[in-house]
Image (cartoon, rainbow, N blue to C red):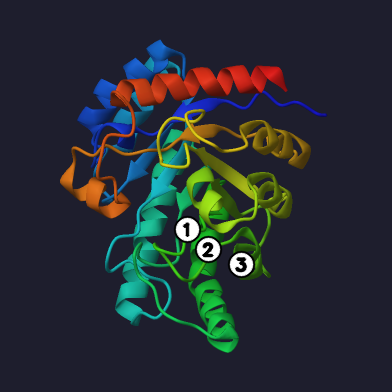
Amino acid sequence: MTYTAWPLGANPWIWHSPVSTEVLAETLPRLAGWGFDCVELPLEKADDWEPAAAAKLLDATGLAPAAVVAVMPDQRNLVRADQAMVRATQDYLRRCVDAAHAIGAPVVAGPVYASVGRTWRMDQAARSAAYDEWREHIAPVVAYAARAGVRIAVEPLNRYETSLFNTVAQTLTGLEGLPDDAIGIALDTYHQNIEEHTLPDAVRTAAGRIAHVQVCANDRGAPGTDHLDWPGFLSALSESGYQGPLCIESFTAHNDAIAVAASVWRPLAPTQDALATDGLGFLRRTRAAL
């Protein structure tokens, strides 16, 4: 087996939403102190944090920028939307690319196709047409990202959060015709646990197009406090050749907006700090055992 020491990261959403420059100033030193290698930076609104300030904080803490995470609330859509909404969504995604370029993040990751929670029924013809429409509308963003040296990472979500891209196979179909080096798949163990037959199978299907990986327990808690096949998942990642970070993404039940959006109705660990540090320790041990 070819073993790759994936950098381990976390998302400030574990504690806060939205993530501001002030939140980064408080969170990044703690992540570095615990021994994380990198951090995801979610950008809910285009001006939530200042890239120049974020870059200074990253440099001061020694954390690498794993990804800028794009957020798709109501009114951000690239399918089944009027042209004004499509243009506004494209502009927002270009802003995410600008932020990623400014801080040196290699990817913009997220469900960059439709508002989270938006679902509708589709037969095969309607699904094919929706994928065509999405490709048409994401293509200018992909080209913009490629010129900036940033890759788009498309995250399939579970059936309760979208009806467009639920599985890796569906996402690969959607990516057909788009350049491999400029757009790929963002895997998230929470969603793959719901939609795929097994986590290793999901990784094997995505091999060659994996651009980013987010990890958490099956209930969005700390990795390792659950029933997921972590050795099988990491072994499949190694076999796939993926060399990027593994970032713990979870949420706090104590923030009205994020708790409702992610359906987090109870604490997922004794403390949010424990969620991050217990997950980090487990991933380190499991990685080392490969």
Judging depth in this view, the residue of 264 and 57 nearest the camera is 264
* 47 w.r.t. 114: above or below: above
Which residue in the rendered view is the most extreme toward the top? 33
Q: Secondary structure at mark 2?
A: loop
Q: Which mark is residue 17?
A: none
Looking at the image, residue 196 sits to the left or right of residue 85; the answer is right
Question: Mark 1 or mark 3: which comes first in sequence?
Answer: 1
Dot 3 amino acid type: Gln
Q: Position of residue 29 (x, y in %)?
A: 33, 16
Q: x and y percent of residue 12 in the render?
A: 33, 32
User: Which residue is at 41% across, 46% downward?
Assistant: 69
Residue type indicated by callout 2: Asn
Q: Is 135 located above or below residue 229 in the figure? A: below
**SS of the residue at dot 1?**
loop
Q: How many numbered badges does the structure rendering display?
A: 3
Q: Is residue 42 left or right of residue 228?
A: left
In this view of the protein, can residue 147 be seen by the observer?
A: no
Residues at circles 3 and 2 in contact by the CB criterion of under 8 Å: yes
Residue wearing tag 3: 170
- Quadrant hosting residue 41: top left
Q: Which residue is mark 2?
A: 166
- Residue 290: x %, y % from top left: 73, 23
Amino acid type, label 1: Leu
Mark 1 lies on residue: 157
Q: Look at the numbered disc 3 and give the secondary structure of its residue.
A: helix
Assess whether mark 1 and mark 2 are in contact (beta carbons under 8 angstroms): yes
- Residues under numbered marks 1 and 3 in contact, where contact means CB atoms less than 8 Å apart: no
N-terminal-most mark, 2 or 1: 1
Q: Label 2 crowding class (10 Å Cα cut-off): few <14, some 14-19, many 20+?
A: many
Between the residue at mark 1 and the residue at mark 3, the CA separation in whole angstroms equals 11 Å
User: Quadrant location of the N terminus?
Assistant: top right
How far, Cα to Cα, is label 3 from label 2?
7 Å
